[in-house]
Image (cartoon, rainbow, N blue to C red):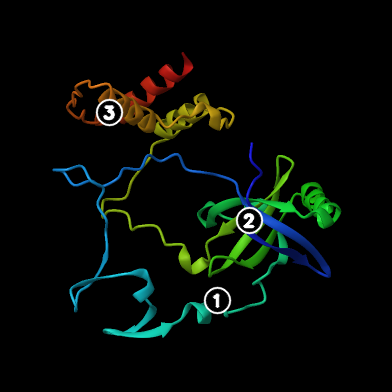
Amino acid sequence: MPAARAIWSGSISFGLVNIPVKLYTATETKDISFTSLHATCRSPLKRPYMCPVDNVPVESKEMVKGYPVGKAQYVILTEDEIESVRVESSAHINVNGFVESADIGPLFYESTYYLGPLETSVKPFELFRQALLRTGKVALAQATMWRKEHMVALRPVDGALVLTTLYYADEVKSPPEPPATKPITVTDDEMELAMNLVQALATDFDPSRFKDRYREALLQMIEAKIEGKTIEVPARAEAPSTQDLMAALRASVAAAKK
Protein backbone atom coordinates (compact mmCIF):
# COMPACT_ATOMS: atom_id res chain seq x y z
CA MET A 1 0.00 0.00 0.00
CA PRO A 2 1.49 3.40 -0.96
CA ALA A 3 2.33 5.82 1.82
CA ALA A 4 -0.44 8.25 2.72
CA ARG A 5 -0.02 11.69 1.16
CA ALA A 6 -0.31 14.67 3.48
CA ILE A 7 -2.68 17.41 2.31
CA TRP A 8 -1.57 20.05 4.83
CA SER A 9 1.26 20.55 7.29
CA GLY A 10 1.60 22.82 10.30
CA SER A 11 1.59 22.37 14.04
CA ILE A 12 -0.72 21.99 17.01
CA SER A 13 -0.19 24.91 19.36
CA PHE A 14 -1.59 25.06 22.90
CA GLY A 15 -0.07 26.99 25.76
CA LEU A 16 3.69 27.01 25.13
CA VAL A 17 3.61 23.58 23.45
CA ASN A 18 4.10 23.34 19.70
CA ILE A 19 3.68 19.95 17.95
CA PRO A 20 4.51 19.73 14.21
CA VAL A 21 1.89 17.63 12.40
CA LYS A 22 0.63 16.61 8.98
CA LEU A 23 -2.98 16.28 7.87
CA TYR A 24 -4.33 13.29 5.92
CA THR A 25 -7.72 12.49 4.44
CA ALA A 26 -9.73 10.10 6.61
CA THR A 27 -12.61 9.33 4.25
CA GLU A 28 -13.36 8.95 0.56
CA THR A 29 -16.64 8.93 -1.32
CA LYS A 30 -17.55 6.03 -3.58
CA ASP A 31 -19.82 8.00 -5.88
CA ILE A 32 -20.15 6.91 -9.51
CA SER A 33 -19.44 9.74 -11.92
CA PHE A 34 -20.50 9.95 -15.55
CA THR A 35 -18.91 11.77 -18.48
CA SER A 36 -21.15 14.00 -20.59
CA LEU A 37 -20.99 12.85 -24.23
CA HIS A 38 -22.29 14.15 -27.55
CA ALA A 39 -25.35 11.98 -28.20
CA THR A 40 -24.58 11.51 -31.92
CA CYS A 41 -20.84 10.69 -31.90
CA ARG A 42 -20.26 9.74 -28.23
CA SER A 43 -17.38 12.22 -27.88
CA PRO A 44 -16.69 13.67 -24.40
CA LEU A 45 -17.93 17.24 -24.20
CA LYS A 46 -15.79 20.15 -23.09
CA ARG A 47 -17.31 23.01 -21.13
CA PRO A 48 -15.45 26.24 -21.88
CA TYR A 49 -16.09 29.35 -19.81
CA MET A 50 -17.85 31.79 -22.11
CA CYS A 51 -17.74 35.58 -21.85
CA PRO A 52 -21.34 36.79 -22.29
CA VAL A 53 -20.14 40.19 -23.57
CA ASP A 54 -17.51 39.15 -26.11
CA ASN A 55 -19.21 35.77 -26.77
CA VAL A 56 -15.87 33.96 -26.84
CA PRO A 57 -14.46 31.09 -24.75
CA VAL A 58 -12.05 32.21 -22.02
CA GLU A 59 -8.99 30.16 -21.07
CA SER A 60 -7.78 29.86 -17.47
CA LYS A 61 -4.78 32.14 -18.11
CA GLU A 62 -7.20 34.93 -19.06
CA MET A 63 -9.25 34.64 -15.86
CA VAL A 64 -9.03 36.77 -12.71
CA LYS A 65 -10.82 36.51 -9.38
CA GLY A 66 -13.31 39.21 -8.44
CA TYR A 67 -15.35 39.84 -5.29
CA PRO A 68 -18.78 41.38 -6.01
CA VAL A 69 -19.31 44.77 -4.33
CA GLY A 70 -22.26 46.01 -6.37
CA LYS A 71 -24.21 45.41 -9.53
CA ALA A 72 -21.63 44.42 -12.16
CA GLN A 73 -18.88 45.79 -9.89
CA TYR A 74 -16.01 43.68 -8.57
CA VAL A 75 -12.82 44.09 -6.57
CA ILE A 76 -10.07 42.19 -8.40
CA LEU A 77 -7.56 40.16 -6.37
CA THR A 78 -4.52 38.45 -7.84
CA GLU A 79 -3.43 34.96 -6.77
CA ASP A 80 -0.38 36.46 -5.03
CA GLU A 81 -2.57 38.90 -3.09
CA ILE A 82 -4.87 36.10 -1.95
CA GLU A 83 -1.95 33.89 -0.93
CA SER A 84 -0.39 36.77 1.03
CA VAL A 85 -3.29 36.90 3.53
CA ARG A 86 -2.03 35.59 6.86
CA VAL A 87 -3.69 35.20 10.25
CA GLU A 88 -2.42 33.69 13.49
CA SER A 89 -3.62 30.21 12.53
CA SER A 90 -2.09 30.18 9.04
CA ALA A 91 0.54 27.57 9.97
CA HIS A 92 -0.78 26.44 13.34
CA ILE A 93 -3.75 24.62 14.78
CA ASN A 94 -4.30 27.03 17.65
CA VAL A 95 -6.08 25.31 20.54
CA ASN A 96 -8.44 27.73 22.29
CA GLY A 97 -9.75 25.36 24.95
CA PHE A 98 -11.02 21.89 25.78
CA VAL A 99 -14.69 20.94 25.80
CA GLU A 100 -16.91 17.92 26.31
CA SER A 101 -17.69 16.02 23.12
CA ALA A 102 -21.42 16.28 23.82
CA ASP A 103 -21.11 20.09 23.88
CA ILE A 104 -20.57 20.14 20.09
CA GLY A 105 -23.94 19.75 18.38
CA PRO A 106 -24.18 17.34 15.42
CA LEU A 107 -25.04 20.14 12.98
CA PHE A 108 -21.59 21.67 13.46
CA TYR A 109 -19.59 18.70 12.14
CA GLU A 110 -18.27 19.06 8.59
CA SER A 111 -15.28 16.93 7.41
CA THR A 112 -12.88 14.64 9.29
CA TYR A 113 -9.15 14.07 8.74
CA TYR A 114 -6.32 12.17 10.38
CA LEU A 115 -3.46 14.03 12.06
CA GLY A 116 -0.01 12.47 12.15
CA PRO A 117 3.26 13.54 13.79
CA LEU A 118 6.60 14.24 12.18
CA GLU A 119 9.55 12.08 13.23
CA THR A 120 10.65 14.89 15.54
CA SER A 121 7.27 15.25 17.26
CA VAL A 122 6.18 11.66 17.96
CA LYS A 123 6.41 11.90 21.76
CA PRO A 124 4.61 15.25 22.29
CA PHE A 125 2.00 14.18 19.74
CA GLU A 126 1.32 10.93 21.63
CA LEU A 127 1.30 12.78 24.95
CA PHE A 128 -1.31 15.19 23.61
CA ARG A 129 -3.44 12.35 22.21
CA GLN A 130 -3.34 10.37 25.45
CA ALA A 131 -4.11 13.47 27.53
CA LEU A 132 -7.29 13.94 25.49
CA LEU A 133 -8.10 10.25 25.81
CA ARG A 134 -7.70 10.15 29.59
CA THR A 135 -9.55 13.39 30.28
CA GLY A 136 -12.32 12.61 27.80
CA LYS A 137 -12.00 16.13 26.40
CA VAL A 138 -12.04 17.47 22.86
CA ALA A 139 -9.63 20.23 21.84
CA LEU A 140 -11.36 23.19 20.19
CA ALA A 141 -9.06 25.11 17.86
CA GLN A 142 -8.75 27.22 14.71
CA ALA A 143 -6.64 26.49 11.66
CA THR A 144 -6.30 28.20 8.29
CA MET A 145 -6.52 25.69 5.44
CA TRP A 146 -7.68 26.05 1.85
CA ARG A 147 -8.22 29.80 2.05
CA LYS A 148 -10.45 29.69 5.09
CA GLU A 149 -9.88 29.86 8.83
CA HIS A 150 -11.71 26.80 10.12
CA MET A 151 -13.00 26.05 13.56
CA VAL A 152 -11.81 22.50 14.27
CA ALA A 153 -12.14 19.79 16.91
CA LEU A 154 -9.28 17.42 17.80
CA ARG A 155 -10.09 14.09 19.43
CA PRO A 156 -8.53 10.63 19.86
CA VAL A 157 -10.23 7.88 17.83
CA ASP A 158 -9.12 4.23 17.64
CA GLY A 159 -5.49 4.95 18.48
CA ALA A 160 -5.33 7.94 16.14
CA LEU A 161 -5.84 11.68 16.47
CA VAL A 162 -8.49 13.11 14.18
CA LEU A 163 -9.29 16.67 13.17
CA THR A 164 -12.87 17.55 12.29
CA THR A 165 -13.68 20.87 10.66
CA LEU A 166 -16.71 22.55 12.20
CA TYR A 167 -19.23 24.99 10.81
CA TYR A 168 -19.29 28.44 12.38
CA ALA A 169 -22.44 29.49 14.20
CA ASP A 170 -23.52 31.78 11.35
CA GLU A 171 -23.15 28.88 8.87
CA VAL A 172 -25.70 26.66 10.62
CA LYS A 173 -29.22 27.32 9.41
CA SER A 174 -32.31 27.40 11.56
CA PRO A 175 -34.74 24.51 11.06
CA PRO A 176 -37.58 25.12 8.60
CA GLU A 177 -40.89 26.33 9.92
CA PRO A 178 -43.37 23.46 10.33
CA PRO A 179 -46.48 23.57 8.14
CA ALA A 180 -49.33 25.55 9.59
CA THR A 181 -51.59 22.91 11.10
CA LYS A 182 -53.61 22.39 14.23
CA PRO A 183 -51.60 21.62 17.39
CA ILE A 184 -50.47 17.98 17.35
CA THR A 185 -51.63 15.82 20.24
CA VAL A 186 -49.74 12.57 20.89
CA THR A 187 -51.52 10.08 23.12
CA ASP A 188 -49.77 8.07 25.82
CA ASP A 189 -50.50 4.83 23.93
CA GLU A 190 -48.98 6.20 20.73
CA MET A 191 -45.88 7.37 22.59
CA GLU A 192 -45.51 4.00 24.35
CA LEU A 193 -45.74 2.09 21.07
CA ALA A 194 -43.27 4.45 19.37
CA MET A 195 -40.79 4.03 22.23
CA ASN A 196 -41.28 0.24 22.16
CA LEU A 197 -40.45 0.25 18.45
CA VAL A 198 -37.27 2.27 19.09
CA GLN A 199 -36.23 -0.16 21.83
CA ALA A 200 -37.02 -3.18 19.66
CA LEU A 201 -34.78 -1.85 16.89
CA ALA A 202 -31.99 -0.70 19.23
CA THR A 203 -28.58 -2.06 18.17
CA ASP A 204 -24.87 -1.31 18.30
CA PHE A 205 -23.41 1.07 15.72
CA ASP A 206 -21.75 -1.11 13.07
CA PRO A 207 -21.24 0.84 9.83
CA SER A 208 -20.01 -2.32 8.05
CA ARG A 209 -23.64 -3.55 8.06
CA PHE A 210 -24.63 -0.77 5.69
CA LYS A 211 -23.90 -0.82 1.95
CA ASP A 212 -24.65 1.70 -0.77
CA ARG A 213 -27.31 -0.41 -2.48
CA TYR A 214 -27.98 2.28 -5.07
CA ARG A 215 -24.31 2.26 -6.13
CA GLU A 216 -24.26 -1.55 -6.28
CA ALA A 217 -27.44 -1.63 -8.40
CA LEU A 218 -26.06 1.05 -10.71
CA LEU A 219 -22.81 -0.91 -11.17
CA GLN A 220 -24.85 -4.03 -11.97
CA MET A 221 -26.78 -2.06 -14.58
CA ILE A 222 -23.54 -0.76 -16.12
CA GLU A 223 -22.13 -4.31 -16.23
CA ALA A 224 -25.32 -5.55 -17.89
CA LYS A 225 -25.05 -2.80 -20.52
CA ILE A 226 -21.43 -3.79 -21.18
CA GLU A 227 -22.62 -7.37 -21.74
CA GLY A 228 -25.23 -6.13 -24.22
CA LYS A 229 -28.25 -6.96 -22.10
CA THR A 230 -31.50 -5.03 -22.42
CA ILE A 231 -32.38 -2.98 -19.37
CA GLU A 232 -36.00 -3.06 -18.27
CA VAL A 233 -37.09 0.02 -16.36
CA PRO A 234 -39.72 -0.97 -13.77
CA ALA A 235 -42.52 1.35 -12.79
CA ARG A 236 -41.76 3.42 -9.72
CA ALA A 237 -43.56 2.03 -6.68
CA GLU A 238 -45.38 4.53 -4.51
CA ALA A 239 -44.59 4.63 -0.82
CA PRO A 240 -47.50 3.30 1.25
CA SER A 241 -49.34 5.87 3.31
CA THR A 242 -49.94 5.38 7.02
CA GLN A 243 -53.67 5.68 7.58
CA ASP A 244 -53.86 3.98 10.98
CA LEU A 245 -50.84 5.09 13.02
CA MET A 246 -51.52 2.77 15.97
CA ALA A 247 -51.95 -0.27 13.72
CA ALA A 248 -48.73 0.57 11.87
CA LEU A 249 -46.82 0.95 15.14
CA ARG A 250 -48.14 -2.35 16.52
CA ALA A 251 -47.26 -4.19 13.30
CA SER A 252 -43.79 -2.63 13.27
CA VAL A 253 -43.09 -3.66 16.88
CA ALA A 254 -44.29 -7.20 16.18
CA ALA A 255 -42.11 -7.47 13.07
CA ALA A 256 -39.06 -6.12 14.91
CA LYS A 257 -39.40 -8.76 17.64
CA LYS A 258 -39.38 -11.67 15.16
- Residue highlighted by disc 2: 103
Mark 3, secondary structure of its residue: loop
The first of marks 3 and 1 along the sequence is 1
Could you tell me how many numbered marks the image carries? 3
Vertical side of 209 occupied by 80: above or below: below
The kind of residue on which mark 3 rests is Asp
- Residue highlighted by disc 3: 244
Tag 2: Cα neighbours inside 10 Å, few (<14), some, or many (≥20)?
Answer: few
Vertical side of 226 occupied by 158: above or below: below
The kind of residue on which mark 1 rests is Glu
Point out residue 250 in the picture as x, y percentages from the top left corner: 38, 22
Point out residue 126 in the picture as x, y percentages from the top left corner: 82, 50
The kind of residue on which mark 2 rests is Asp
- Image quarter of the N terminus: top right
Point out residue 76 in the picture as x, y percentages from the top left corner: 40, 84
| Mark 3 vs mark 2, CA separation in Å | 39 Å
Evaluate if marks 3 and 2 touch, with contact meaning CB atoms under 8 Å apart.
no
| Mark 3 vs mark 1, CA separation in Å | 61 Å
Q: Nearer the viewer, mark 1 or mark 2?
A: 1
Mark 2, secondary structure of its residue: helix
- Residue highlighted by disc 1: 83
